[in-house]
Amino acid sequence: MAKVDYSCLIPNNVGLSSDKALLRGLRDWQTRFLSWWSEVGPQVFGDSEVYLRTAVSPATWGWAHFGYVRMHEYRWGIFLAPRVKDRVIPGGDFAGDKVWQELPSEHRQSLQRLIVVQADAEPASVEQQRHLAGTCPSLYDCRNLFQVNVEEARHLWAMVYLLHTHFGEDGRNEADALLARRAGATDRPRLLDTFNEPCAEWLSFFCFTTFTDRDGKFQLGALAESGFDPLARTCRFMITEEAHHLFVGESGLGRIISRSADLSRRDPNGDVAAQGGIPLEMVQRYINHWYSFSLDLFGSEISNNASEYFAAGLKGRRSEARVPGDRLVLKSTVRIPQMEEGCLVDRVVPMRLAMNELLRREYVKDCGRVIDRLNRVLADAGLDFRFTLPHSRFNRHHGMYGKTRFNPQGEPIATGQWEAERELWLPTEADRGFLASLMSAPVVTPGEMAAWISPPSRGINGMPADFKYVRTGR
């Protein structure tokens, strides 16, 4: 395993110091990156010392070193997971062939597109969440937000390294464009709609890190199967960091639910809102919103591009070695319901054309397990309410279901019914106003917690609940 060079201003285990031209290009990009971070990174407590973890090695022992650091001084680095000896392409037409260490010219455009789309999501989420610290429910949560932000920025660095190293001038231009686009901008928005959605409330943040970052886990898992080994190694290390983001989201939702359950018992009418908590029905609407937007990130249910990526070995099925069946996937099929004359009709589709849908179905199952765990919180609290996942056809904006309205059960409905009932299913302006009234100011006294969320069961890195995770100066 290559040793991490911390003498370089860009910590790395890819030998940057020996490639002066590459180092010079990344140093120039680093200047632009820091300007971007200052402009649209965390805008509250952004100059404070934060108790963050920093990767010091891709080895198991070294990926989480804790200490106080100001975020603009964070040591964003470039880390590739160790090379797997004799690794071969796991699936597709070239299954069993040796993986590529250099960029194959015939796949240059496709690989560049895959990397750019993945890379664009990383800075977008930082931009979406840049004001959230101003209403943080505790220093513990503020610190977790900042940890997610710096790691998403490091994921951006990982992809920019690939663009600079393997794609020449085109790659450098794409790396610059990643800092020019803005989440939610009308003139130069982020590439994927989900990353242009406002994430202005902590309930949105916890749903985002539960569902949208979970999409990231699955997308990175598919790219980690790539026959282009530098991309695969980059994504393997990124997956390690992604796990904490999922923990932040799911544990945050669990703490909201636990607090709401407690407040409902205190109120004679079970009115959570009257007691300063978040009603469970509102939580369900936010789950519906972020889950359905995250489903769009997997792409079209039937996709020639996805088929070609798999066939060429550019992107695989997640954990390909554990997937039973034919590595070539030439004979397998899958059933996908399609809209025909206003009705859903099952159609048999070659599995290669359904690679996006296979990954989405894995994701749906994983999200179902999350909902089961959240419902156990409700059951343990003695409440009858239960959360559900809406059908994967609900509230879709892309793919074969993007032009038809479906109810949460996945049944096609008329536009009039959708307009009449959508406020039962998705967040409303009243919901956003109510959350804004609850989350009007940050809680920055160590150990204190906003009234709408329960304390965490344990602190970060063994620290106590009243540890000053962010030195805010207040």
Image (tube, rainbow, N blue to C red):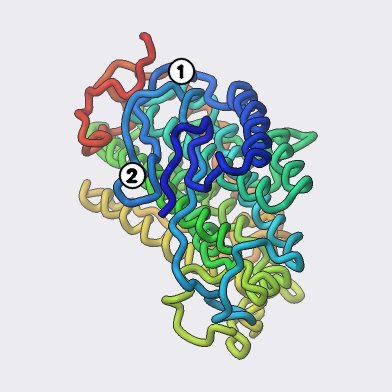
Q: Quadrant of the N terminus?
A: bottom left
Give the foreground label among 2 and 1: 2
Q: Nearer the viewer, residue 230 or 320?
A: 230
Q: Tell me the residue at 44%/34% (across/down).
A: 6
Q: CA distance from mark 2 to mark 1?
A: 27 Å
- Residue 237: x and y in percent read 45, 52
Looking at the image, tell me whether mark 2 or mark 1 is earlier in sequence order.
1
Q: Tell me the residue at 38%/56% (across/down).
A: 371
Q: Tell me the residue at 27%/35% (across/down).
A: 460
Question: Label 1 belongs to which residue?
Answer: 45
Q: Nearer the viewer, residue 470 or 302?
A: 470
Left or right: 18 as drawn, with respect to 68: right
Dot 1 lies on which element?
Answer: loop
Q: Tell me the residue at 60%/60% (across/down).
A: 298
- Residue 433: x and y in percent read 53, 27
Residue 68 found in image quarter: top left
Relative to 430, say whether 468 is above or below: above
Relative to 339, say whether 268 is above or below: above
The residue most toward the bottom is 331
Question: Label 2 belongs to which residue?
Answer: 62
Relative to 235, say whether 202 is above or below: above
Residue 355 found in image quarter: bottom right
Q: Residues within 10 Å of mark 1 (few under 14, many from 20)?
A: some
Is residue 246 something one can see in this rendering?
no
Dot 2 lies on which element?
Answer: helix
The residue most toward the top is 474
Q: Amino acid at mark 2?
A: Gly
Left or right: 285 as drawn, with respect to 467: right
